[in-house]
């Protein structure tokens, strides 16, 4: 069973994602801001992280960079999902970070998100 961490301040989005992926057999943890997300990433050790860009305390780019600092979290693939309009420069900024594997809009169908993250999940050893 794969573990997912959703770091997002939007309650509706987190709830929708949690229900969808729980129904598919994932264990889904939630964090409502970047600071909480960083702490949970270390304790939960998720297989994948869905990360919002704009959050009140610690933004998505800071979370991505902090995840890379720690040996415990640097290899966790991150899919950045934003509800705000983003331009190519913002997408390029996030994609420069080695742990950012996808950059998607929150309007993306959940089945498409599922298809994008499936190949990123840790393989059993």
Image: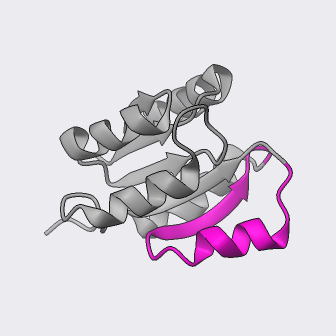
Image position, residue 5 (x, y; %): 40, 41
Which contiguous range is marked in magenta? 85-107
In the displayed structure image, the side of residue 28 where residue 73 appears, left or right:
left
> Looking at the image, which residue is at 65% across and 29% down?
13
**Residue in the picture at 49% in, 54% down:** 62
Observer able to see residue 24 = no
In reply to whether residue 93 is colored magenta, the answer given is yes
Q: Which of the pair 115/28 is nearer the observer?
A: 28
In front here: 9 or 77? Answer: 9
Q: Residue 76 appears in which quarter of the rendering?
A: bottom left
Quarter of the rendering containing residue 12: top right
Against 38, residue 11 (above or below) is above
Residue 87 in which image quadrant? bottom right
Residue visible at 72% across and 68% down in the picture = 91
Question: Is residue 121 rendered to the left or right of residue 64?
Answer: left
Indicate whether residue 19 is drawn in magenta.
no
Give how far across and how far down residue 93 sits, in percent: 66, 72
Q: Name the spot of residue 35 as percent of width and height, x first.
A: 40, 36
What quarter of the picture does the C terminus occupy?
bottom left
Q: Is residue 103 left or right of residue 66?
A: right
The structure's colour scheme is: one colour
Residue 57 in view in this figure: yes
Which percent across, then down, holds residue 22?
44, 32
Q: Residue at x 57, y 46 (%)?
A: 59
Which residue is situated farthest in the left direction here? 125
């Amino acid at each position: 069973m794969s573990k997912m961490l959703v770091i997002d301040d939007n309650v509706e989005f987190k709830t929708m994602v949690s229900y969808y992926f729980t129904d598919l057999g994932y264990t889904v943890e939630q964090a409502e801001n970047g600071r909480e997300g960083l702490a949970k990433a270390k304790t939960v050790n998720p297989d994948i992280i869905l990360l919002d860009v704009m959050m009140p305390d610690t933004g998505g780019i800071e979370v991505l960079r902090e995840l890379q600092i720690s040996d415990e979290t640097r290899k966790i693939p991150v899919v950045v999902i934003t509800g705000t309009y983003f331009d190519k420069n913002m997408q390029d900024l996030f994609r420069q970070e080695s742990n950012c594997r996808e950059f998607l809009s929150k309007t993306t169908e959940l089945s498409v998100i599922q298809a994008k993250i499936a190949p990123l999940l840790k393989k059993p050893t």
